[in-house]
Image (cartoon, helix red, strand yellow):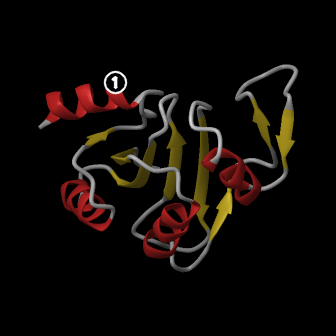
Amino acid sequence: MPYSADCYVMVRSRSSALVRRLLTQFLPNGAEESVDEYEVPRYSAEPQQVFATADSLMNYMETHPNEPHSIYWRSISDSDYRHVTVHYTTDGAMVLGAACPAETDEDELLVVLMKEFDSQYGYITYETPPPDSAAEFIEIARKCS
């Protein structure tokens, strides 16, 4: 399987509605979560909370602006996009992502994401997650433009 191009844009919001719009627009034929549960804090051996669904984690993340986390969804059908992601930063922002096969239409995908989510900052990378802070994301995006 060819490698993926990951297109990321940053928004200054943690709105679950934006995440649902991402899923609806880029995986319209359905998606499945990539994990069975979500621990908070992320990667903790002794989590304070465990969420069974992405929806419950998204609700929690809306009211905890300094908590970092990530959610990945896979396409359940043949799609131009392999997966979509949301990454919550340590400083209240959210990074929305969509992946397509590398060296196909990642430039166009980035433009569409930036317009759809009214984002000033975005960049393309290859099979690499975004940083945990908005400041680091902006720095990378500026270097890539």
Q: Position of residue 45 (x, y in %)?
A: 84, 19
Q: Residue furthest bottom?
A: 29
Determine whether, in the image, residue 44 is placed left or right of residue 98.
Answer: right
Q: Residue at x 70, y 29 (%)?
A: 42
Q: Residue furthest front?
A: 63
The foreground one among 3 and 81 is 81
Residue 125 visible in this rendered orientation of the protein: yes
Snapshot quadrant of residue 104 = bottom left
The foreground one among 76 and 132 is 132
Snapshot quadrant of residue 70 = top right
Q: Position of residue 79 (x, y in %)?
A: 46, 72
Q: Residue at x 46, y 34 (%)?
A: 129
Q: Residue at x 27, y 60 (%)?
A: 118
Q: Residue furthest top?
A: 45
- The quadrant the C terminus occupies is top left
Q: Residue under label 1, please give it.
A: 136
Q: Residue at x 85, y 36 (%)?
A: 49
Determine whether, in the image, residue 142 is placed left or right of residue 133.
Answer: left
Residue 104 visible in this rendered orientation of the protein: no
Q: Position of residue 18 (x, y in %)?
A: 48, 63
Q: Position of residue 97 (x, y in %)?
A: 42, 51
The answer to whether 82 is drawn above or below residue 80 in the figure is above
Classify mark 1: helix, strand or loop.
helix
Q: Crowdedness of circle 1 by 10 Å Cα count: few (<14), some, many (20+)?
A: few
Tag 1: residue type? Glu
Determine whether, in the image, residue 51 is placed left or right of residue 110.
Answer: right
